[in-house]
Image (tube, rainbow, N blue to C red):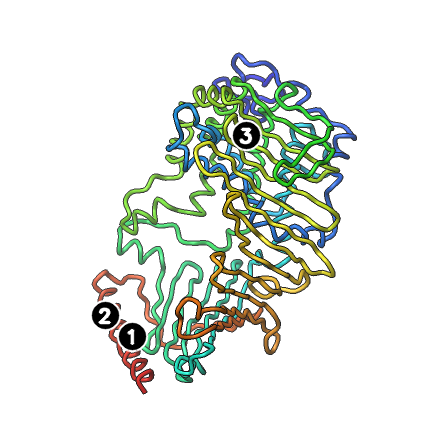
Amino acid sequence: MKNCPNCGQEVQDEEKFCEHCGEKLEGAETVSAEASATGAEASAAAESSEGGAAADHVVSASTATEAAPAEPQASYSYAQTIEEAPAGKKGMKLLIPVVAVIILLCAGFFAFGKKLFSGGVALSTEQKFLHYQEKYLQDKMDAMVALGFINEDLKQSSDMTLTGEIEGSDEMNKYLKDSQIQLKYDMDAEKNSFVMNLSAKIMGTDLLEGFADYRDGKIGFAIPVADEHYYRGDLKTIMKNLTEQDIVAPDLKKSAENRKRLAEISKKYGDLLVGSMNKDNLTVEKKEFTLENLKEKYTGEVYVFKPTEEDLKNFYEKLADTVEKDSDLESLLEDVYATSTWDSALGMGDAKTPKDQLSELAKEIRDNAADTAKEMADNEFQWQIAVVDGDLRQVLLSTKDDSFSLEIAKKGKEVTEQINVVSSSSENMYLKNSYSVKDKMLEGSISGGNGVLDVKALEYKIDTTKHSALMPYGTYIVEDPTGMGAKLTLTVADGEKGSSDHEIVVEGLQNYYMPFSSAKINLNTTKTGTATLPKEEEVDISNYSQEDFDKLSETIGNGLAKVAATLQGELAG
């Protein structure tokens, strides 16, 4: 055993990097004391914007889907277009290993409501650099949950009923009257249970009813109109008999546990990234800065992370070693995806195990560490953020030829957030969301384009105090950007008996040579579902052979053919 020169912890003799702090153990200088500097002033600056009322989260909720995944989206955009880039302009392809860490950090933030850095601990300059970005993302997540766009409950249920009508077509309305499709579901992750019912009614006649469930490793289904039995069996046994492969059965109970595990893994990679920063490659200065695209000026703290070639090479090597030995990530991937066993069982080829995939990823990062580090340094890669009174105002990832930025402008209760992608190998793009809150109503619009063709994609007015099983109450409007006159309006409001209506009205259809002017679809949802299990006689299909399933499929198919014939008769009548 030997001791790390940086943190003093014991590590194995053969280790190249400290597993506790990430310090390089062979030929590396001790990490600067600045990397771990703490103090009351640092703590106050980092925490000045934490806490706050729920309404503050709600203000920024409308941009959660736009801004939260910003860094991964932009990086993928660069990677996808890089093959067409001219020689010498590899742009953001160089950032892929860094972006892999950012994606994992974002996943941790969104998977579990836990801060990367504890609010009760003074933060170093390096930690604050990530903290401000993490807090921004976490605020988005909190707002999405508060508004009702995301439901994190382990128990969820609802009855959803779809109906419709057409303006200007009595013939079509004849069939739509007293017709509906209904979906009922009841999920209880703690009991590893999911039950679903699907039914259809045409012109007042019950046409179809189906049941499906997954409970404690067993799957079941029934279609009474086609066959008077409830078929149920052990999923692992069924797949073993049919494919001779052992599969990992879904375990809904692990959802909360996996969120915690992902948060812990996220912190590990956050620490790794912080460990690559020091007083020489990360600077902070209070000064005036400009949001170039939003044309706004502020005075605040500007952090600039500009690693050297050696810094980048060391980071990639540590990243490779961490990924290769990350048993926590390997276990999580196995539990969540179980890709290797399922792909093999379903005849999609012998997929590689998570361990093999992580090993290959680590090897690729390690083999390219030196070249990638040199190219990034030669292309003057830097990562900059700007903060005003503890609130993030800018994130900028750039090289000499390409950049991705997130800009946030605030004037009182009015907020504008814009993502910008500038690339030497593809068209420049932006996506902007402008919004404000007044009397508990969140009102704004989302637009985007390339500076030549600009489109207002959505206008919205949301009630921040009320939501359905799916989304917040309010009005959402989309208009055809070609100018032909079509307009789609979604209104979410109270329905009957405590339910919620999601009414979609599409107007101006006559301009598209339709035989009617508008169409209306309504989705009614309840906050409590009434899904049930079938009452038909239960048949154990755990040991069914392929031939047995073929016969069962034929029986159900013949039954559904009769249903189709009945439907045809109803419509003809």
Q: Amino acid at mark 2?
A: Glu
**Is the C-beta separation of discs 1 and 2 under 8 Å?**
no
**Is the C-beta separation of discs 3 and 2 under 8 Å?**
no
Callout 3: SS = strand
Locate the C terminus by quadrant.
bottom left
Q: Which mark is residue 554?
A: 2
For mark 1, what is the residue?
560
The residue depicted at 49 percent of the width and 72 percent of the height is: 521
Residue 299: x and y in percent read 74, 33
Q: Amino acid at mark 1?
A: Leu
Residue 509: x and y in percent read 45, 69
The span from disc 1 to disc 3 (Cα, nearest Å) is 58 Å
Q: Amino acid at mark 3?
A: Ser
Q: Where 488 sits versus 301, above or below?
A: below
Give the left or right position of residue 212, taking residue 472 as reference: left
Numbered disc in front, either 1 or 2:
1
The residue depicted at 76 percent of the width and 28 percent of the height is: 39
Crowdedness of circle 2 by 10 Å Cα count: few (<14), some, many (20+)? few
Residue 466: x and y in percent read 65, 65
Q: How many marks?
A: 3
Residue 100: x and y in percent read 49, 35
The residue depicted at 47 percent of the width and 72 percent of the height is: 518
Q: Where 461 sits versus 133, above or below?
A: below
Q: Which mark is residue 398?
A: 3
The span from disc 1 to disc 2 (Cα, nearest Å) is 10 Å
Q: Where 166 sits versus 153, above or below?
A: below
Of the numbered discs 3 and 2, the one sitting upstream in the chain is 3
Callout 2: SS = helix
